[in-house]
Amino acid sequence: MARYTQDSIERLRESIDAVELISERTDLRRRGSRWVGLCPFHEERTPSFTVDPERGLYHCFGCQAGGDPITFVRETQGLDFSEAVEALAERYRVELKREREDPAEEERRRRRERLLALLDRTASFYSKYLWDSVEAARAREHLVERGLSREVLEGFRVGYAPSAWDKLVLAAGRDGFTEAELTGAGLAQRNRRGGLYDRFRERITFPLADARGRVLGFGARALNQEQGAKYINTAEGDVYHKGRTLFGIDKARAAIAKAGRAVVVEGYTDVLALHQAGVAETVAIMGTAMTREQVAELARAVGADGTLVFALDADSSGQEAMLRASRLAADREVELRVVELPEGADPADLVRSEGQAGVRERLASSVTVLRFAVGRVLAAADLATPEGRDRALVRARALIEEAPERTARRDDLVRLVADRLDVPLEYVAGAPAARAPARSGPPAGAGGADAREGGGPRAGARLDAESTFLALCLRSGPLGREYLGRLTPAHFSSDLTRRAADHLRETFEDPLAGLPQEDAQLTAAVAEIALRADTEDVVEQGVVRMSFLGLEQRRIEREIRHARAAGDLQRQGALASDRQRIRREMDAVMGQAP
């Protein structure tokens, strides 16, 4: 795929009003030359989020989020780099130029753009027909009976396909679209005599859009049994791929990014009802066959440590879909939870029967997928016989063994199963390791093993010290440039800060110049460092030197640990001497401090 030229990207950055763009997500107020507000990336009461309109940068001093407008759109809307660039270029009317696009690739791109334009016009055609035509009266009544407002229906561009065989074909032809484009977009098909007719007729239509809101196809619901299948979709083709599509992702992506949570349902009207009830982070998988691509898209949208909440129908296929999704998401840093729905009810039914407050209460009381799976085993068990309890015990224990040992959640499940099956805890806990005493010392992620290997508070402190030093260098002019030149890869515990230092050495006078197009992490890191440099007061030489000595000390301590692990006594001795020297230099600098 062709990349956009760096000149195009720079013209786009220069055209964006960062304050206007970011103000759509949080209220900003001027403070000197900056704008400040509550961070849109985490909950806070005191503003720690700042925007520099001159340089087009933002940074949160609370959660460390930062970057330029392209990064902001990526993070708040769940887009990749190219998608964010294209969305901003459309908004600010900036022409993007591609690098080295071959003729075949250009032809494919132009054809796709034509198909997308046709699909978008078709969505508008169907939507207008729903509200303006006499024929669609029954469809309007059906949607009202489902409790859906005109506002939410128009927001999602729900429409109605006329009953005539060729109404869309004729309208599209008048607009200059070819028969090949109509079939390529999945809107028409040929009869036995080779004639062209509309694929969707006498059905309620739901546009299926990507994360940017571009219509890729349609789902269509019949209003009577004589029409055959209750739902039909656009056929798989050049544009539409069912396994990659999530209904409502374009409307939900901002809410998902802000909440760090996506609510996953089965059907179109479930999405509409929950959005109407204020649960704007809802999307649908359009059935129960969830795919790896859909899980990946949702994991990217919620971000690291985000949550996917499944509210699928309570029948067996919905339950199996939730368990299948948990297996697909096993290697991703997201938590999966399940809303347990009443038998025979779907989320749209709950909105009508329990209202907004009831739906939110059910979402808040969601359970882990493991708890849900164990609950299924217990609900299906024949508890009246020893044989039935034994079968349930074997199945429940197999599920529990997949959970991490010595966690509160695991212990809670053990107690639940033991109580329901009326067996001792030891029968459920199974392996001796599960009954072993807890390890002494801090748990992983709280200063223990995880912190030593790069996670936890210690790692955060190291990275902050490295970023602070780079900011001091930027603020210190020629002195800072000199100290940047002294750095080696060994001074960094993070590849990201090392790459940021490499970039700053090359672009010291203009840190934001020449950032790699698709390296969002580096863009955010450099933006944060540049903003820190601007907020620093005049920096004394001793402060820069002290910060550098701190990096030196940590470098030496890391190398001592490596030498100790390798049993290299000679190296340990030399490094110990270096450590003493650094401490003396630090004492000397401290002694010079006022």
Image (tube, rainbow, N blue to C red):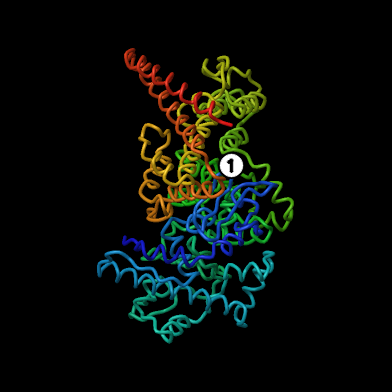
Are there few (<14), some (14-19), or many (20+) residues within 10 Å of tag 1? many
**Amino acid tagged 1:** Arg
* Position of residue 86 measured from the top left corner of the image (x, y, whole percent): 44, 65
Q: Which residue is at the front of the view, 273 or 569?
A: 569
Say which element carries label 1. Answer: strand
* Position of residue 89 measured from the top left corner of the image (x, y, whole percent): 45, 67
Quadrant of image for the C terminus: top right
Quarter of the figure with residue 270: bottom right
Q: Residue at x 31, y 62 (%)?
A: 2
Q: Which residue is at the front of the view, 215 or 220?
A: 215
* Position of residue 331 measured from the top left corner of the image (x, y, whole percent): 45, 39
Residue 274 visible in the shown view: no
Residue 125 visible in the shown view: yes
- Residue placed under numbered mark 1 in the picture: 337
Q: Residue furthest bottom?
A: 174
Quadrant of image for the N terminus: bottom left
Quarter of the figure with residue 34: bottom right
Q: Residue at x 73, y 50 (%)?
A: 358
* Position of residue 143 measured from the top left corner of the image (x, y, whole percent): 65, 68
Q: Residue at x 67, y 61 (%)?
A: 276
Q: Which residue is at the front of the view, 206 or 25?
A: 25
User: Quick check: 420 left or right of 588?
Assistant: right
Q: How many marks?
A: 1
Quarter of the figure with residue 336: top right
